[in-house]
Image (cartoon, grey):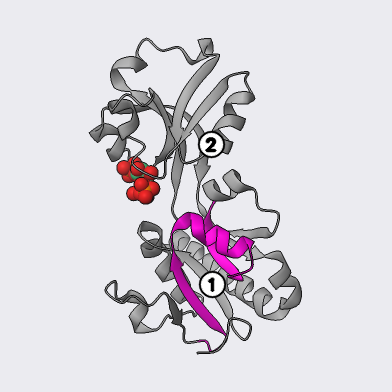
Amino acid sequence: MSSKRDKLVIAVPKGRILHELMPLLRATGIEPEPAFYDDSVRQLRFATNSVDLDIVRVRSFDAATFVAFGAADLGVVGADVLMEFNYAEIYAPVDLGIGYCRLSVAEPEEMSGSDDPGTWSHIRVATKYPEITRRYFAQRGVQAECIKLSGAMELAPNLGLCRRIVDLVSSGDTLRANGLVEIEQIAEITSLLAINRTAWKTRPQKIGKLIEDFRKALAKARSTIETV
Ligand code: PRP
C-alpha cells in the first residue's frame, strides 16, 4: 500500500449517512474496493478505483477530526460537527444535501404543556453538542449547564440525569419511543464536503478536481429530480 503522502484520503462517516452517500460517491466516479462494503472485515483503510485516492470509514465526529488535522485530505462531515468544533483548518465548500435532520431541544411530553421557555434563566441539558447548546441559549440570556454524553441522550430525562436534551432528530421515532417531544429547533443539518485547507493549498489540482466532481454529480442529481 502506498503511503498517505502519495495518495489523497477521504474520510466518510459510518452508518446511516454512508447509505445516502454511496450513490453520490459513485456519481463522482469514486468506487471503493469490495472489502469496503463488508462489515466483517477489520481493515479500516481501503483503496478505490482511483490510484490517487484511498477511503476510510470512521465515526461522524471523527471524520471532521481526521480532516481538521490533515490525516485525511477531505471528508464528509455533518454541519452539526462543524458548528460544534468550528475547526479553522476545515473549509466546507459543498453542501451535499444528504443526512438531513434537525438539531433540537426536547423534553418529556408531560412537561411540555406547562413549560414556558421564556421563563428559563438556567437549564441543565444532556447533549453531544455542549458548545452549540451554550451559544444558542446564551444568545437569549439563558445559562445552559451541559452534561456531555456520546449517545443515547434520550435516556437522560428518563433516568433523572436532567429534564432536557439537545440532539439530532430525523424521523422523531427515538424521541417518541422515549416519551420526549421537540420543543425548539436550533438548526437544520445536512452533510458537507470538508477539505483540509493545507491539503488544498499543497495539492490544488487533485483536490479542486474532486470538488468539481462532487459539484457536477450534485447538479446532475438535482436536474434528474427536476425532470422526473
Ligand atoms: C441519532 C440521534 C438520535 C436519533 C434520531 O442517533 O442522536 O438518537 O439518531 O433519529 P430519529 O429521529 O430518526 O429517531 P444515531 O442513530 O445516529 O446514533 P448515535 O446515538 O450514535 O448518535
Residue at image position (59%, 70%) is 71
Q: Give how far across and how far down residue 128 sits, in percent.
A: 46, 41
Q: Which residue is mark 2?
A: 130
Q: Quadrant of residue 33?
A: bottom left
Q: Which residue is mark 1?
A: 10
Q: Quadrant of residue 163?
A: top left
Image side of residue 158 versus residue 29, left or right: left
Image: 37 above or below 195: below
Residue at image position (30%, 34%) is 155
Q: Give how far across and how far down residue 39 sits, in percent.
A: 29, 71
Residue 227 visible (yes or no) = yes
Q: Quadrant of ligand 1?
A: top left
Image side of residue 207 versus residue 100, left or right: right
- Amino acid type of the residue tagged 1 in the rendering: Ile
Residue 96 visible (yes or no) = no
**Numbered disc in front, either 1 or 2:** 2
User: Residue 128 in magenta?
Assistant: no
Residue at image position (53%, 65%) is 218
Where does the magenta region start and end?
A: 50-78
